[in-house]
Image (cartoon, grey):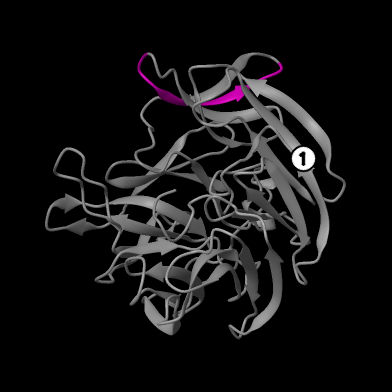
Amino acid sequence: MTGPYLSNRSFALATCLLLAAVTACGHDVTSPGAGAIRFLVVQGSNGLGQTIVEFQGPPVIVRRSMPTFTSDSGMFVLARDGTGGGFYAWRFAGSRPNAAGWKLVRYDDDWRIAATYSDTASPGTQPYVQLTPDGRYLVVSVFNSGSLLVLDAATLAVIHRSVQPLYLSDQAQASAATGSQVLLSSPSAGECPVSLVWWDASTGSTADSTAMPCDYVLLGALTSRRVYRLGPQSGTPRTELYDIMAAAVLATADSVVPFLWPYVLPASGRLVVFESSDAAVVDPQTLTVFGRISTGTGTLGPRFVNNSITDPATGDVIGATADPVVCVGCAPSPDGIVILDPVNLKLLADQRLGAPVQLVY
């Protein structure tokens, strides 16, 4: 996780984000109109004073906000409810989660409680949730049980449980999963080679499976057998499109290396890779670099993105930005928002918000 209040593994892949159709997911809007882009962030440090905020842009302005902690209760925001303004949250009494049980809540577009699921088991830590690409199911990973709980996305009614040795892959990571599938993979510091399983949440069965060679970091998947990877970690890493079945590198981008956000982000039929001071925009098949977009400049120099999403309505990219870290052991604290147009290679907005921010996926 990148913060105590929101897992960076939480976010719903809309159809245009699926790399299985990345070249067909077009974007013929040259630039969004004022306020055309809407997105959610959790703003502020954990505890009293923290809020969930809906922004619109460009320019970046607040549409509405709500405290996540009050004097008698709190919640961790987990994921957006599809592509609207609703969201899922983990609610609890008091200022800390109740270890003896937990409650998952869906807030609708008007931010009213629309559905609730309660569980008496201790999750150990906040659950990680992920919507299936078709938006029908919510898959909940309960860390201390090693199981995946599948709920109806609207009502939070239980569909089934499944014990799985693998983990839900980060939803910030591009995936070839479609329909009711989700991507499961090995833990980041575990198995070698890295297992990849496309798991059907509706049935609990495996739709496809394969494994990526060791010494590489998975950046995303174009298809179930063609993946984006970074490596070798034991040498000079580079970004590659790799065919697992043929054991062949199909394309490389030697000059493109992710910084703190180790994923490729599909947007408008292109891929966005966040480097240390900019966003490289590349072709999803050839990894040819179309160009680079600034991710903002602060008093300490160029700023970098450490979490990001694609706007499903416009295909533009929203990133949370931070100043470069200048001391050993310091953790980056994003406190700004940038909006990027990956087609026209433009920085549409760059704004500081004055408090820690984390995008809601």
Q: From this viewpoint, is residue 177 visible?
A: no
Residue drawn at (60%, 64%), measured in percent from left and top? 312
- Depth check: give the residue in front, 358 or 113: 113
Q: Secondary structure at mark 1?
A: strand
- Depth check: give the residue in front, 22 or 195: 195
Quarter where residue 327 is shown:
top left
Residue of label 1: 199
Q: Which residue is farthest front?
A: 100
Quarter of the rendering occupied by the C terminus: bottom right
Amino acid at pointer 1: Trp
Range shown magenta: 235-245
Give the percent coordinates (x, y) of residue 59. 36, 77
Give the percent coordinates (x, y) of residue 125. 52, 52
Residue drawn at (44%, 57%), measured in percent from left and top? 344
**Relative to 135, is 72 above or below?**
below
Quarter where residue 169 is shown:
top right
Give the percent coordinates (x, y) of residue 33. 48, 77
Residue 237 magenta-drawn?
A: yes
**Relative to 348, is 241 above or below?**
above
Residue drawn at (66%, 66%), measured in percent from left and top? 82
- Locate residue 276 relative to residue 306 in the image: left or right: left
Quarter where residue 254 is shown:
top left
- Depth check: give the residue in front, 17 or 85: 85
Residue drawn at (31%, 47%), measured in percent from left and top? 278
Q: Which residue is farthest right?
A: 203
- Locate residue 34 relative to residue 118 in the image: left or right: left
Residue 205 magenta-drawn?
A: no
Q: From this viewpoint, is residue 135 visible?
A: yes
- Depth check: give the residue in front, 241 or 77: 77
- Locate residue 155 relative to residue 13 in the image: left or right: right
Characterize the local packing of mark 1: few (<14), some (14-19) or many (20 or more) Cα atoms within 10 angstroms.
many
